[in-house]
Amino acid sequence: MNKLLTASIKEVSQKINAGDVRSSDITNAAIKVTSIIKPLNAYITITNETAKKHAESSDSRQKDCSLLGKLDGIPIAIKDNYCTRNHPTTCASKMLSSFIPTYDATVYQNLKNVGAVLIGKTNLDEFAMGSGTIDSYYGPTKNLWNSDVFKKFYSCNSQAKEHIQQNTDAHSWHIAGGSSGGSAVAVATGSCYAAIGSDTGGSTRNPASYCGLVGLKPTYGLVSRYGLIPLVNSMDVPGILTRNIDDAVLILNNVAGPDGFDSTCFQKEYVPFDIPDTIDISNFRIGIPKEYKEKNLSPEVQECWDEVSQYLTEGGASLSTVSLPHTDYSIMCYTVLNRCDVASNLACYDGMEYGYRSDEWSSVHNLYRKTRSEGFGKIVKERILVGNYFLLEENYEEYYVKAMKIRRLISDDFNTVWNNNIDLLLTPTTLTGAPKYNDFISMDNQAQCSVQDYCTQSANMAGIPAVNVPIKLSKNGLPLSLQLMGPPLKEKELLTVAKWIEQRVQFPKIELKDLSLLE
Amino acid sequence: MFLSKNISIFIKKYHKNTFKKCIRFISGNVEEWKPTIGLEIHAQISTKSKLFSGAPTNFNNPINSCVSLFDCAIPGTMPVKYNKYFRKVLNKKCVEAGVLTALALSCEVNAVSMFERKHYFYSDLPAGFQITQQKKPLAINGKIKFNVFKTGVHKQPYSKSSKIKQIQLEQDSGKSLHNEGVGRSLIDLNRAGIPLMELVFEPDLTSGEEAAALVKELCFILQLLGTCSCKMEEGALRVDANVSISKPNAPLGIRTELKNISSLSAINHAIEYEIKRQISILQKGGEIINETRAWDPLSKKTVLMREKEEKHDYRFMPEPNLPPLHLYVNRNVQNTYDLIDIPALKEQLPELPEQIRQNLLKSLTPDTLAAITSDLEWYLLFCDILKNGNHREPQLVAKIFISEILSFINNQEYIEELIDLIQAKIINQPTFKKLLNELLNKPNKMPKQIVEENNWFIISNEKELEMICLEILKTNPNLVKQYKAGRKKVFKKFLHKTFLLTEQRADMAKTSKIMTRLLS
């Protein structure tokens, strides 16, 4: 059973289908995992009752030979900024700590429709504003790698020498990345097979990079945002976190497609695809953007990048250096657009219709003031204030309009590259392996995000698909990853090359070791 | 008793004060001031469902029963409508209504318009912003032509036109109900998200009369198109007026904004009051403050609603959840995406008031024309009479309609008293009809007087009625025999005889009861 929890969805699905294992057994085991990883704080809510119900109906479908597909009976987790009917949806904020939606987000609805089992709602930075999953009302999420939990319960097939860490300081653990850190840790630990994150500036790819997972950000508009509590409406994309490319494809095939509830979704029918196990990459032309050789890029990540470039060349792909000249402006531009949307999107939290309400009756405006002062965390409040400043009539042209123009230039950078016969781009995802909490919090949120989102942000500006592929472990035993980006709607090409890399680099697999634990 | 006395004293005082003030206002030299008025009109579009959600729009539904998740800004919801093919479209009916209205008002319809967010905090605005159009609205540069005419003031109707700056689609807000007694506010979100057309007019009117005439004409057009019910009492059409005064040839003065104007006559009165108020302030060397004032129909005054805190910054930004609204305007290219077809809508436009008047002017005198087209219902009735007999002379039809039929209806005091008489059971139904017929003879007496003079009071005293009934039974032994033998039909005959005997004055309900008792 322990091995099965960290196997691929395809493998488990075959076993469920054949009756070798019941969804209930897997689900119960997964729920047990959630309790051993509790110190990592991946979940805000464990939906064990619902999970058991979902699993039981999957069991009976299996008996009736009426399984709904490969995801039937498979445990998954959902980031806690997606609405789930009758389950708390908190956005990791005090403001929504009591909010229980009456509807399901389309992404979750689609997964439910094909029999997936909801294990729980995962932790994030408050309203997804962050890149470390450290600014949550429910406390930070810790990385599995190099954690005590890892040492106690997991083994790794890597030949890399076991890295012995002196964990003297309580704050010297590694962050999971964010803002979908909870989803990443949930998948990495085997408490579920896949998790839905969200990606506005890198929030899915960043924790995927630090946790050694596949993190897919699909093309903007390919997957419905209905029910995803918005951060930046024109950049938010539901992200997919899995342990391998095939699993990500499977999830994508089940969540993508038109949605009547989201006007910004593509209206064209989505065509599901599979990626063969034998891949020829000789026709691919891959660009290496020189602007991504950022000065803070760690030598180890650079080494990874060079190595994989070398592999791809050996595999027959043609590699060339390209330029995305406006990359440097992306973060500043994103900062402005992000704050503006935040100011607007968070205006609805006034304690009137739902959510936290302060006990204040002197006047409506005092009620608003107190509710919003008490309900939002520091970073959220800062962003709201700054956003409102940018949107003032006198500042609008100077900030918002200018940022929109730069956004267009960034997007055009990519178009120029695609028009010059480049199929995909290979870059780092993050500049380093997962930082230690201590080091991370020595910077403020703005500085954290500008370092963390450097390589991932531009894809959101342009709305293009991107994927994080784990490559190897660092000397410290932490995952190092790279990112592939492609033109809009070229998910298949993107994931084909990603799978080729996956096969080539053989990123270490982890397993739960204490066999007696889950029996 | 004590209470009502107090109230009447209060009312008297109140009236005395306003009277004094009015006198003071008028004493100033009005001639040297030039009033300027610009209107902003919000018209609810007549549709079954809201602009961006599927919730119904019926005015009479119970509080908070027409609220979708989106209408109360539940996180994660988005503004959207989807059709039966599950293709998302903006509420097509709303856009078409907006376009029809724009075309009828000679606007340029924009091939691409955009939605924006306008931010402000208010308890009946759950999202904290309103989705509206500002920078790139549905239509721009229109105009409305209308006739201004007031019996006793103008000898002849005169023609006036006002420019329309833009027409934009937007969401209505909810309603706040303030309960002063318990110090609580209650919120009804049924109205939140109902589609509105906002029509922004240039400040080119000069009197309350003109403003009222403009709104009347607009209502005529919107009702003709069926795009708005224009029921001001239900808030389906809301008029805000910007009023300022200045010396001729001088730049416009500081304006005040008038709100809460809920009838045609209130438009005129509110603006006229405000003009006089402003003149009186300026003549005393005072200064007009840019503020929002509400029309109080009871005291017939404008009262301060809120002072403009510096300038309210609405922090507009593009609505990121809605793509731009594309319309099909150019027939030379193909309508590939099945967009709303502007040229086709243009062809669908009915004959508009302006054309109607041009055509009717051939057969009607200007004042008859003005009267018959001053109300859509009258006009449609007039058209029907002509349509049902094309031999009928329009001028004669209109004249009879206005001078006879409408003057009949317009005799409001007489009708009011008549209604009171029947409601108080002083007269019965047949007498009511007789008195209504009297009205045709243009009586110089009021109904009550006629009733008194002719002794047309209802007979409802039971003893009196019983006596009459007994008399009928006594004089008709044959009928009684037939009735007792089982011919129940003859009962009606007893009633009829009673009716005649009392000169149609008997309370027939009571008579019927008494007669039944006597016969059993």
Image (cartoon, coloured by chain):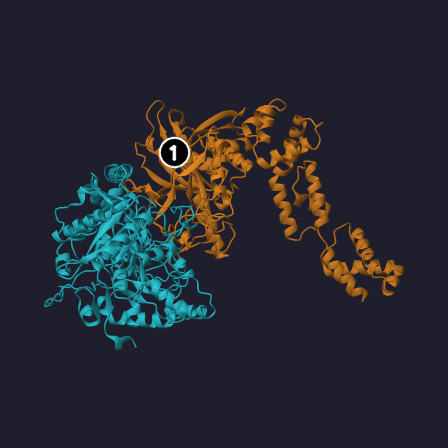
Chain colours: A cyan, B orange
Quarter occupied by residue A355: bottom left
Residue B128 percent across, percent down from the top left? 34, 49
Quarter occupied by residue B187: bottom left
Q: Nearer the viewer, residue B470 or B309?
A: B309
**What residue is drawn where x is 23% and y is 37%?**
A398
On the picture, is B228 further left or further right than B248?
Answer: right
Count of labels shown?
A: 1
Q: Nearer the viewer, residue A282 or A435?
A: A282
- Can you see residue A79? no
**What residue is drawn where x is 72% and y is 44%?**
B434
Residue type at tag 1: Val
Q: Secondary structure at mark 1?
A: strand
Quarter occupied by residue B255: top left
Q: Residues within 10 Å of mark 1 (few under 14, many from 20)?
A: many
Residue A294 percent across, percent down from the top left? 15, 46
* Quadrant the N terminus of chain A occupies: bottom left
In the displayed structure, B483 sits above or below B436; it is below
In the displayed structure, B208 sits above or below B489; it is above
Q: Nearer the viewer, residue A519 or B119?
A: A519
In the displayed structure, B515 sits above or below B271; it is below
Residue A316 percent across, percent down from the top left? 24, 46
On the picture, is B372 further left or further right than A383?
Answer: right
On the picture, is A439 further left or further right than A189?
Answer: left
- Can you see residue B84? yes
**What residue is drawn where x is 21% and y is 69%?**
A154
Q: Nearer the viewer, residue A490 or B30?
A: A490
Q: Which residue is mark 1?
A: B243
Residue A512 percent across, percent down from the top left? 24, 70
* Quadrant the C terminus of chain A occupies: bottom left
Using the image, name the chain to which the residue with label 1 belongs: B
On the picture, is A473 further left or further right than A240?
Answer: left
